[in-house]
Image (cartoon, rainbow, N blue to C red):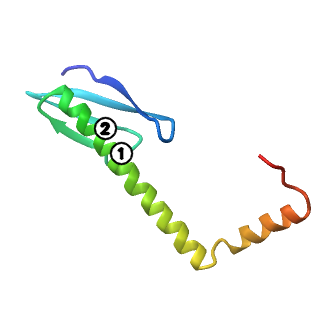
Amino acid sequence: MEPIQVFEIWDSEYETTYTAHIQRNGSGWIGWIKEHPKVRCEESTQEALLEILESTLYETLEADWEAWDKQIEEDIKAGRLDQLREEALEDLREGRCKDL
């Protein structure tokens, strides 16, 4: 079996590096990103595989971010963050905050 090759994918928007692992798989290539198990694919060439891995990673990240945003909105509407809001306002009133 061929050794696993490692490539870095840089996300400039969030300044994060993801590690793509690729390996020859018969006549093609298989690749995955451990940090995001949903990002896994097979292609006929190494170049195509890396392109698909990168685009799949960004699609997956975008879907995760949208789901997270939706969950935060639902939590706010349901009042699940009210206690945290009150604690933050109290800290601000009491001078326990500093400008960033």
On the image, the x and y values in percent for residue 23 come to: 23, 27
Badge 1, how many Cα within 10 Å: few under 14, some, many 20+?
some
Q: Residue furthest bottom?
A: 78
Left or right of 53, for residue 90: right
In the image, is residue 34 above or below residue 93?
Answer: above
Q: Quadrant of residue 5?
A: top left
Work out whether 86 lies above or below 9: below
Residue 33 in the image, given as x and y percentages of width and height: 35, 38
Seen at 19% across and 26% down, the residue is 46
Residue 2, by quadrant, is top left
For the point 73% across and 69% down, which residue is it? Answer: 85
Give residue 58's mark.
Answer: 1
Badge 1 amino acid: Tyr
Q: Which mark is residue 93?
A: none
Marks 1 and 2, how far apart in space?
6 Å
Residue that extends furthest to the right in the rendered view of this protein: 94
Q: Which of the two residues, 21 or 74, is positioned nearer the viewer here? A: 74
Residue that badge 2 annotates: 54
Query: What SS does tag 2 mark?
Result: helix
| Secondary structure of residue under mark 1 | helix
Check the picture and name the quadrant holding the N terminus: top left
> Would you call the spot at circle 2 few (<14 residues within 10 Å), some (14-19), or many (20 or more)?
many
Q: Position of residue 92 (x, y in %)?
A: 84, 62
Residue type for callout 2? Glu
The relative height of residue 78 versus residue 5 in the rendered view (above or below) is: below
